[in-house]
Image: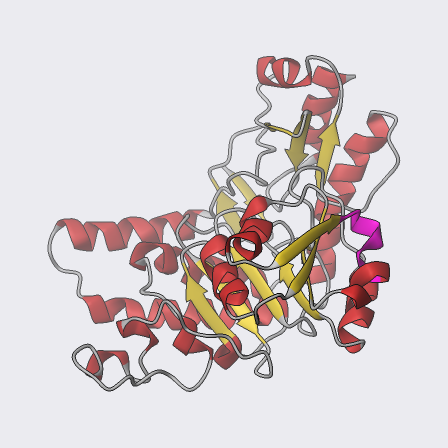
Amino acid sequence: MRTAFGMKFDVPDGYLNTASIGVPPAPVADAVAAALQDWRTGTGRPADFDEAVAVARAAYGRLVGAPPDRVAIGATVSGLVGLVAASLPPGARVLVANGDFTSLSWPFVACGATVEEAELDDLGERSGEFDVVAVSVVQSADGRVADLAALRAARDGGTRVVLDATQATGWLDADLGWADVVVGGGYKWLLSPRGAAWMAVRPEFELVPRQAGWFAGDDPWTSVYGLPLRLAVDARALDTSPAWYCHVGGAVALPWLAGLDRAAVHAHCTGLADALRTGLGMEPAGSAIVAVHRPGAMERLAAAGVAAAARAGAARLAFHLYNTEADVARALDALA
């Protein structure tokens, strides 16, 4: 067991795969296990989960710079982005980064927008030609960080900016509250169970609640039957019914992450990643994700007991709160 930033983790040595699945702090796993025990024994009740949903919602808002009334909940990033895509007018033009994660780009294509790809570093320069720029804050494949200053300038120029912060929130020290939409999944850097996602939306960007169900009601427990439509007046109108046990974990993990010294977290994660880069003769990049293009890298890492992922022809390694210099050394021994 390791202790990091005041939390205990049952994470194995050499676990460098947070960009695929984050390992929860022990109290997060314990909370989920207790809720599952209530389910198993028939003592759980639906309304018991309302507080967890509210706590996780508010904490996500703190992490990305938005008040709780601007945060909607969902199950996946693609489902939430789909609401954005379906709300755009016919013929809307959307710019995305070349090779970005498809849960962000595909919903716009599927909803009929005209979607073009450009190099990540060119998005800000080309944004004036488009109605929307949609981009991952940190690229899943290789950890490159988007030019947030250029994107913010694009928004000031009238282009809507949609950010997928799934690979960023939890380690990246950056202000995202200016963006029109900030969406993210919980099961990577936010150390929560898979099945919970959140989306912060600026109020002037009106989205159509096309998935409206009982949990999108102004008072869900009094609007479960019959017409008329009685939606919440804030971002909760975009909610889908919560995956309860995922939010139980999120209600423990997200407030803890939101309360950490963000600069210290950023320095820890990127410091370890850049130490690996330096050891491999690569330039520092200021990202917690490292893509290693070396023949046989995945096989060598696996043989050394290092958990990583194969992405876009490279071995992808990711450093989070629970990683240490010993993890860097193990990876270097395998790859150098």
Main secondary structure of the magenta stretch: helix
Residue 254 seen from this side: no
Q: Is residue 306 above or below residue 227?
A: above
Task: Determine the residue located farthest toward the left in the rendered image.
Answer: 42
Q: Is residue 60 above or below residue 26?
A: below
- Is 293 situated left or right of 250 in this image? right
Query: Does the magenta portion include 335?
Result: no
The residue under the point 75% across, 76% down is: 158
Residue 9 seen from this side: yes
- Is 318 situated left or right of 246 in this image? right
Q: Picture quarter containing residue 219?
A: bottom left
The residue under the point 75% across, 22% down is: 332
Which of 172/7 is in front? Answer: 172
The residue under the point 75% across, 73% down is: 155
Q: How many marks?
A: 0
Work out which quarter of the rendered image holds the C terminus and state it. top right
x, y (%) of residue 116? 70, 52
Query: Does the magenta portion include 121?
Result: yes
Q: Is residue 33 above or below residue 280?
A: below
- Is 73 situated left or right of 321 in this image? left
x, y (%) of residue 306? 60, 23
Q: Picture quarter containing residue 134?
A: bottom right
x, y (%) of residue 67? 55, 79
x, y (%) of residue 59? 51, 69
The colour scheme of the drawn protein is: secondary structure
Where does the magenta region start and end?
118-124
- Is 34 situated left or right of 332 in this image? left
The residue under the point 66% across, 31% down is: 316
